[in-house]
Amino acid sequence: MKDMPTIQPDGLVIDCYLPREDVRDAFVSPHVGGIDELPQGAVVGSSSLRRRAQLLHRRPDLQLVEFRGNVQTRLRKLDEGVAVATFLAMAGLSRLGLPGVARSAIDPDQMLPAVAQGCIGVERRLNDGATGALLAAIGDQDSALRVTAERAFLARLDRSCQTPIAGLAEISGGELRLRGEILRPDGSQSLAAECRGPVGDGPAMGDDLARELLGRAGPGFLAGH
């Protein structure tokens, strides 16, 4: 779901979310244990605008290079010394049966994940009630509540996954906690906020949280101006 646009084409809807996997980012490196252990000026590979901005905000001394390809391609690049570390999603590694590839899982308090990371959604035709009924049997309510809150946050901000935006909703004791972060693409500035409320208010909370950050950021923040 982290790669799905927030607005679906006419006649299509996403209203089924499977049980969410691990939301965390994975730190992957042959020799380094985590972000704080990276040597001064180390070369790190990532093509994610969010991860690049978050990393540069925390460690502006690092050098970032583009890192594309499947898991095996990225691991080969690490072995070849193109970079000393990269990032993947823990959910993806788990689904591939490769959780051991991660040197460590990054706590969301250190690096807030992408909106809807770790969740699979099923898109269907809006007027196909029979399919909707079938999907209702496999949908996970907790995942749906969390992801719809996060995607409402993203929708107000940008409507895509092409800018440095992070968000995570968590449910505990009937309360939803939503955290959001926006960054300048060069990592020079980060703005973060959070809110709490009833689980059913997730979409409204997402919209409100985005409005708060946009008001603090001013025009052009996400474009790096």
Image: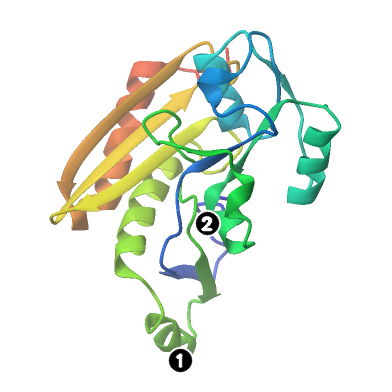
Q: Position of residue 208 (x, y in %)?
A: 27, 37
Q: Position of residue 202 (x, y in %)?
A: 26, 51
Question: Upstream in the sequence, badge 1 or badge 2?
Answer: 2
Residue where numbered disc 2 is placed: 1
Q: Give the residue displayed 54% in from the left and 27% down from the top.
A: 34
Q: Is residue 12 visible?
A: no
Extreme right residue here?
80
Instruction: Please tell me in which quadrant of the rendered image residue 214 appears.
Output: top left
- Up-down relation of residue 117 to residue 122 (above or below): above
Residue where numbered disc 1 is placed: 130
Q: Is residue 55 left or right of residue 73?
A: left
Q: Is residue 76 left or right of residue 167?
A: right
Q: 224 or 106, which lies in front?
A: 106
Q: Is residue 187 left or right of residue 152?
A: right
Extreme front residue here?
31
Report crowding for label 2: few under 14, some 14 to 19, many 20 or more residues within 10 A (C-alpha). Answer: some
Q: Give the residue displayed 30% in from the left and 27% down from the top.
A: 193
